Image (cartoon, rainbow, N blue to C red):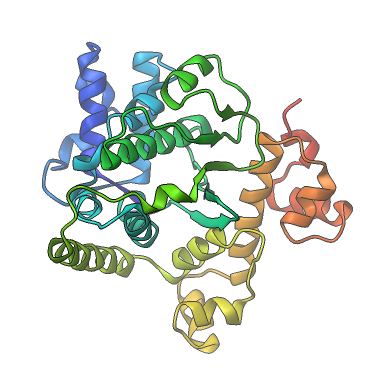
Amino acid sequence: MPKTSTPAQYILILIDMVERQGCERKKLLAGTTLANTDISSIGARINDADFNQLVANAQALTGDPALGLKLGLRLNLSAHAVLGQAFITCTDLAQAMDLFLKYNHLLASGLHLEFETIDKQCILTMASPPGETSIEFAYELLYGALINTLRGLLNAPGLCLRMEVPYPRPAHADLYYQVFGEDVQFDCVRGRILFHRDLLGTSLPSSNPVLRNLYEAECARLLANLEEEHSVAEQTLRLLRKLEGQYPQMPQIAHMLNLSPRTYRRRLDEEQKSFQKLLDQVRSEHATRHLLNTRLPLSSIAYMVGFSDASNFRRAYQKWTGKSPAEVRRP
């Protein structure tokens, strides 16, 4: 099984949504292994290839450009399984946010998040490459699930936060305003959700420290099992994506993985991977996202992915992708 995966309960919800529109399950599952897989068992996960194919089928069958957003809005606290239960038993939103940042890979193992507080503003930044799934679907799913989960957790159905979207305004933008409120900004440099830090102090009505400890222990066990499946190369990619703009060198990555540089190199050799190629892959992903979804000058993008000038970046990007930055950038 590919190492990045999605909880099966999310897939079951998507299947239910599409079938309710009159689509046949056989057509929805075409090209996947899901027809021969027990995805209804507790703890089941779906690999990326099946997830991406299922999403493509669902979009083709429904013709719904807002399918990702609608799916996200179906993902409530109960859909997040044990982590959702852990959220409910937290003392306040700050504690729940800590759990989310610590265990979010249980919800989407390819997800990469950054969280910071600047002055009185909390900023949650998403840097999750969509892979074969469209960037719009990936972000709509994430934004919809986050706002729905927060509203349920805080018992605040009208909660609205500032949403910054890293792609141009879609044809169904009115639905964004209907769901998220008026403070939605498109064509931003990065995908971010912003809110006042006072929100972190909001007490949660179902706080239960004893149960929270039990649920967190189970989350830790599940995460450890999930990460054991990951190769060193995959763990490296995850770290590099998470540390966008910093790009640690090989000895630093080895240290983060609790390996000596020598053991780290040997493990990569066994997997027929090289650190430089993994680093270039991530820099290429980050550069491509900025080229496709922002209007930043090439010199700025070059600097953000570790180049001192645009000309060296152009040559490297051509080598990585076979295309020039100008060919990739939207008109």
Res 57 seen here: yes
Q: Quadrant of the C terminus?
A: top right
Estimate the x, y position of residue 300 in percent, counting from the top left.
80, 49
Q: Nearer the viewer, residue 125 or 127?
A: 125
Q: Nearer the viewer, residue 61 or 111?
A: 111
Residue 219 location, quadrant = bottom left
The vertical placement of 87 against 216, above or below, is above
User: In the visual, does 172 lie left or right of 53?
Assistant: right
Estimate the x, y position of residue 125 in percent, counting from the top left.
53, 48
User: In the visual, does 61 lie left or right of 320?
Assistant: left
**Which residue is at a point 17% across and 50% down the rendered structure image?**
206
Q: Nearer the viewer, residue 181 or 3?
A: 181
Estimate the x, y position of residue 306 in percent, counting from the top left.
75, 61
The vertical placement of 125 against 165, above or below, is below
User: In the visual, does 141 lie left or right of 164?
Assistant: left
User: In the visual, does 278 lie left or right of 200?
Assistant: right
**Which residue is at a point 18% across and 67% down the rendered structure image?**
213
